[in-house]
Amino acid sequence: MSFSRTTFARRAAATIAAGSLAVLAFTGCGVSGSTATAAGGSEKPAALDEKAPLFKLLPQEVKDKGVLTVATQPDFEPANFTPAGATGIQGYNVDLMESMAKQLGIPVKWEKVPFDQILIGMQSGKFDAAIAGMTDRKKRQEQVDFIDYQWAGTVFMVQKGNPKGITSAVDGGCGVKIGDVKGSDAHRLVEQMAAACTAKGKPATQLISFPNSSDKNLALTSGRIDAIFWPDMAVSVIKRETGDKLESLPVDFEEKVYLGMTFNKKQTELRDAFLTALKAIHEDGTYDEVLKKWDVEVIDLDTPGINLAQK
C-alpha cells in the first residue's frame, strides 16, 4: 500500500530509539491532497457556497452558523492523522468529509478530540458531525445516528515471531494483554476471548486501555502488551512505521463491520443531507478516487446507509 510519508507510528518508532514519547498533534478540497487545519489554527473556513449542488438541503441553523464543526481524533493513518512537523490533519476520512461538505456548500472546521469524548460531544451538540473510524453498533445507535460509509475487517498485530503463540480462534489468546484506545470497540472482542478462555479453565484475556493509537502501538513494540486489534486495510502502515517489528494474523471470530460518521439524533435533516452528499460522491466517482488515492479500496461500501448495523 502507498500512504502518506510520516505519521504517528513513525514518531512512535522514533520514540523507542529516543526514549521519549512524541505527542501527536483536516480544510482541504476533495481528493486533491487536502490538509485540514484544526480548531485554533491560523486558517479560517471558507464562506458558504450557495451555488453548491446540494446547498438547499442544509438546515437553516447550519447555514446561519456558516460552518460545520466536525470532530476526529487525528492519530490513525491512513484515515485521519497529523504528519510529524505538521499541524493540519490528513487522510481519506478528511477527503471524504470535505468532498461531501463541498457538495453541500458548507466549509468544515475540524476539532481534535479524544476518541472517548466524541459521542459525548455529539450528544451535547458541541459538534455537528464526527468522522473517526467509529464502529456502528446497535448500542451506540441509541446515542447517535450513523451514516455508514465503509467496511472494516480486523486482524491481530503481534510482535514478530508471535512469541505468545496467539492464534486466530476466540480462545487463542488466553492470559494475554491486548491494548486498545479508551472508548473503542475492543472491549467487546476481549470479553468474548476472556469468556471462551475461562470456560476452558484458562486465564482470561485482559484489555489494557490507552489514550491514543500511538501509545498502544508503542506498548506493543516495547512488549508491555501482547497484541492489539488493527484494521485490515492498514497493516502495511503499522508494520512499516514500527520498523517491521510486528506481524498480523486474522481474527476468526469477528465479521466485517460498518464504520460510520456520526450525527446528533435530533439533527436528522443534517444527517440526511450528508447521506445524499455521500451518494453524490459515489455517483460522480469522487468516493472511488479518494479510496484509490489512499490505497484503501478494501473498505469500499457500495451502498451506504443510516444505522446499518444489526447488533
Image: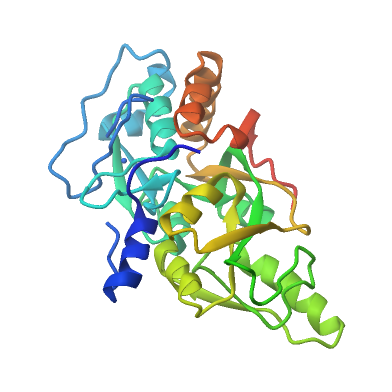
Question: Residue shown at 32%/60% (left/top)?
Answer: 11
- Which residue is most to the left? 42
Splitting the image into 4 quarters, where does residue 49 fall? top left
Q: In this view, does 271 lie to the left or right of 155?
A: left
Q: Is residue 202 above or below residue 212?
A: below
Using the image as rendered, state which of residue 38 and residue 311 is in the foreground: 38
Which residue is most to the right? 200
User: Residue 120: in sight, yes or no?
Assistant: yes
Q: How many labels does the image show?
A: 0
What percent of the width, then of the height, locates residue 288? 53, 23
The image shows residue 85, relative to residue 54, as above or below, that is: below
Residue 217: x %, y % from top left: 46, 66
Looking at the image, what colour scheme do you see?
A: rainbow
Residue 115 drawn at (x, y percent): 44, 60
Nearest to the observer: residue 174 or residue 249 = 249
Can residue 273 be seen here? The reply is no
Using the image, determine if residue 91 lies above or below residue 284: below
The residue sitting at 66% across, 48% down in the picture is 153
Q: In which quarter of the image is residue 46?
A: top left
Q: Is 70 or 165 nearer to us in this picture?
A: 165
In this orientation, which residue lies closer to the viewer: 280 or 105? 280
Q: Position of residue 102 (x, y in %)?
A: 36, 23
Q: Which residue is at 36% across, 64% downward?
A: 12
Who's the residue at 39% across and 32% down the image?
95
